[in-house]
Image (cartoon, grey):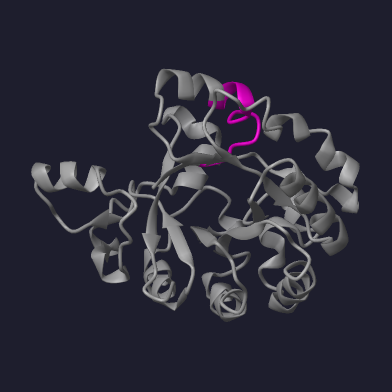
Amino acid sequence: MLILAPMQGLTELLFRKAYHECFPNALDYAISPFLSLTHGNLSEAWKKIDDVIPQANLGSMPVIPQILGKEPAEFVDLANRLYDIGYKEINWNIGCPMRKITAKHRGSGILPYPDEVKTILDTIIPQLRPSLSVKMRLGLYNADEIFKLIPILNDYPLDNITIHPRTGRQQYSGQVDLNTFEEVLPLIRHRGFHDRTWSSFRPHSPAQDKKRQHKRRRPFSPDEVHPHTARRNQPTTHSRSEQNAQNQGILVSATVQSPHH
């Protein structure tokens, strides 16, 4: 599965339509740039709702709206409104590393506080009509924070989890932490996404590669991923897309599925 990662200010509707027109059926779907519940204000998110209105997205690739916020009531309200206009899945952004956002326990700023994550999920999951997926980092200050979060996330019926293997404090610099990512992967009971620019699969022939293209939805098990053979100087999908791609072009995510899903 190939997914267009969100990048604020670039991968909005106009870009998605142009990309789909030039490369039809190249991607399975896109995650929208986030709709922000700034200070719990639903109207702030609604200002950008045109980006995900289904009628406006006709002729584009499928899109899943992403919400940035920590206010349960407003989150449920927005998510259920999005469901009413046709969306069956909503993505929760708890990976954004911008300091003005993390300072308010939003984005990756909530990762050091697993009890807050649990409280929010306890509140919103029973009320959500769409399914919920999560985008996150390994932590805000250190990568070990994720080990307290995964058992909590495993308790909920999430659709999938996207992990950017850096901390929030790293922003988009420094090495991705493939060792921690490798440890975390088999602990997740949900589908997980990663980027094949830095995580390679077992060597295969061109014929096998062609066959794999026709079976892209086949789930991969963790032992098929070889992080230590990866090109460690390549950032992840979300890092390269979110930093305006730095002349690297727009990247997509590949899917890897845990054996517990």
- Number of numbered callouts drawn: 0
Task: Magenta stretch: give its range.
Answer: 5-16
Quarter-of-image position of residue 31: top right
Q: Residue at x 86, y 55 (%)?
A: 74
Judge from the rendering whether residue 214 lies leftward or rightward of residue 27; answer left or right: left
Quadrant hosting residue 111: bottom right
Residue 108 picture location, percent across and down:
66, 60
103 to 189, vertically: above or below: above
Task: Pick the quarter of the image with the C terminus.
Answer: bottom left
Is residue 14 covered in magenta?
A: yes
Q: What residue sits 60% from the left and 71% below the top? A: 157
Residue drawn at point x = 26 percent, y = 70 percent = 223
Q: Which image quadrant is residue 115 in?
A: bottom right
Left or right position of 191 against 17? left
Does residue 85 appear to the left or right of 211 in the view shown?
A: right
Predominant secondary structure in magenta? loop
Above or below for 167 versus 215:
below
> How far from the left and from the top, in percent, is residue 20?
47, 24
- Judging depth in this view, the residue of 145 and 204 nearest the camera is 204
Residues 93 and 213: in front is 213
Q: Is residue 126 magenta?
A: no
Q: Residue at x 62, y 56 (%)?
A: 95
Residue 134, horizontal then vertical, whole percent: 60, 59
The spot of residue 23 in percent (x, y) is: 39, 23
